[in-house]
Image (cartoon, rainbow, N blue to C red):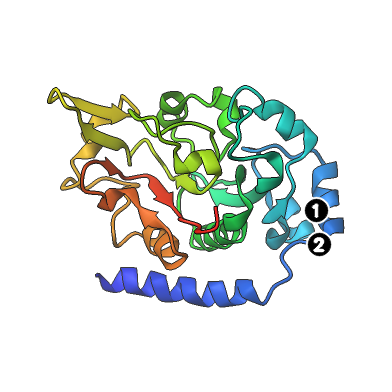
Amino acid sequence: MSFISIRKIWSSIFICLAFACMNITSASTLDDLVSINLDGGDIIDEQLLDFYGENSFFSISDIPDSVWKKMQGKSYHENPYIKRSDLSYIRVLHCDYDGKIRLGEMVCNKAIAEDLREIFFILYKNKYPIERILLADNYDADDDIQMGANNTNCFVFRYITGSNFLSYHARGLAVDLNPRTNPYCRVKKDGSFFVQPSTSKEYCDRSNNFVYKIDKEDLAYNLFISHGFTWGGEWKSLKDYCHFEKEINQL
């Protein structure tokens, strides 16, 4: 591991300790933020950051009615496995590929909500580039479309690609991060190559160097692993380089 990578990890540890000592978001501050009608993807300017404080933009709440309505028939379908009360709505800040600070939003399982808030807080403080963090419903919960748009996301009720088994995304226990340059790559039984998003075949060769590549020296990789997630880039039968999932025994 390079000196730069080690320095980043230690920097993240100190930020993590500071994060643990903070009262991140009070109910009144969260209500104030909601009242100014910020949407996922909005640019957060210095005036807003100075007035509310950056920590106030990292929030966890029950899913608002407006978001729940938006999810119906898209990311959420009636099922016996996961219900509204199992899920949380989180907001975070992130730096996009142009260095602008944007508001991100995500639905996840309550069991990992604190993990994600802490991970994305540290990524933000390190100016880790994430192009967008929007609800999957903005893309009709279509995996190829939202991955092609490089959308970082969590909850979508769906099955594992090419199988009849529920994805960890279906329980809100998985995150896909910067998927366009970190695609899902699999050799099918007929020998053909399946890539998702379909336009990202060039990024399946991880021996190449390119920007926004997740590998074992990457800050995001180390943060997710330290919070008990596993990485799809280490799977044997296929590779899902954007994918981090966490097993929760009681679920």
Mark 2 is surrounded, within 10 Å at the Cα level, by few (under 14), some (14 to 19) or many (20 or more) other residues, namely few
| Camera-nearest residue between 47 and 128 | 128
Q: Are discs 1 and 2 less than 8 Å apart at CB? A: yes
> What is the quadrant of residue 124 in the picture?
bottom right
* Image location of residue 239, percent across then percent down: 26, 43
> What is the quadrant of residue 176 in the picture?
top left
| Camera-nearest residue between 96 and 162 | 162
Q: Is residue 4 visible?
A: yes
Looking at the image, which residue is at 40% across and 71% down?
9
Secondary structure under the numbered disc 2 in the rendered image: loop
* Image location of residue 20, percent across then percent down: 63, 74
Q: Is residue 89 visible?
A: no
| Camera-nearest residue between 136 and 192 | 192
Q: Amino acid at mark 2?
A: Ser
Looking at the image, which residue is at 44% across and 64% down?
228
Q: Amino acid at mark 1?
A: Leu
- Quarter of the figure with the N terminus: bottom left
| Camera-nearest residue between 143 and 101 | 143
Question: Residue extending furthest left?
Answer: 191
* Image location of residue 22, percent across then percent down: 69, 73
Mark 1 is surrounded, within 10 Å at the Cα level, by few (under 14), some (14 to 19) or many (20 or more) other residues, namely some
Residue picked out by circle 2: 26
Residue picked out by circle 1: 30
Secondary structure under the numbered disc 1 in the rendered image: helix
Looking at the image, which residue is at 71% across and 45% down?
85
Q: Is residue 208 left or right of residue 178?
A: left
